[in-house]
Amino acid sequence: LNVLLRNEPALHENQFSIFGFEWVDLNHRAESIVSYRRKGKKTEDDLLIILNLTTVVRNDWVVFVNNKEFTQEIFNSDNKKYWGTGDVFNPNVRCELVDEEQKFYKLTLNLPPLGGIVLK
């Protein structure tokens, strides 16, 4: 995790600034899913972090984001090297452009139970 923190500017560049964080989706309180964006000084450094705070695997979970395609999973807490099952992962993030004018994207993901993913 320290390597991730050191290598990803969005996790440390704007650490103490209001410009380093943005809520993405807070409308799933009942399912205990939280999505937020960590922002670097450059938009291409931004990361999307999604946390599943329940014991239920969420397959084909949909999240809408704007201004950036997130196409690569760079961290998954369900990975076996973090003592996860290794069963829930996103080798190919399904990213679909929904609104071309506003650059609005729909992501379809698999979320591990009691875990989180980081997308770039």
Image (cartoon, rainbow, N blue to C red):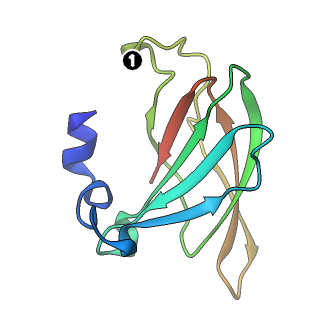
Residue 14 at x, y = what percent?
28, 67
Within 10 angstroms of label 1, few (less than 14), some, or many (20 or more) residues? few
Position of the C terminus, as image quadrant, is bottom left
Residue 81 lies, with reference to residue 63, above or below; the image says above
Q: Nearer the viewer, residue 61 or 90?
A: 61
Residue 92 at x, y = what percent?
59, 42
Residue 56 at x, y = what percent?
74, 22
Residue 77 at x, y = what percent?
47, 26
Q: Nearer the viewer, residue 15 or 9?
A: 15
Direction from residue 77 to residue 81 in the image, left or right: left
Direction from residue 23 to residue 44 in the image, left or right: left
Q: Residue at x 30, y 54 (%)?
A: 11
Image quadrant where residue 88 sits? top right
Q: Residue at x 60, y 51 (%)?
A: 35
Residue 27 lies, with reference to residue 113, above or below; the image says below
* Total marks placed: 1
Q: Nearer the viewer, residue 118 or 99?
A: 118
Q: Residue at x 49, y 14 (%)?
A: 84
Residue 98 lies, with reference to residue 12, above or below; the image says below
The residue that mark 1 highlights is 82
Q: Residue at x 68, y 74 (%)?
A: 104
Residue placed furthest toward the bottom: 101
- The amino acid at mark 1 is Tyr
Q: Secondary structure at mark 1?
A: helix
Direction from residue 60 to residue 85 in the image, left or right: left
Residue placed furthest toward the right: 30
Position of the N terminus, as image quadrant, is top left
Q: Nearer the viewer, residue 30 or 13?
A: 30
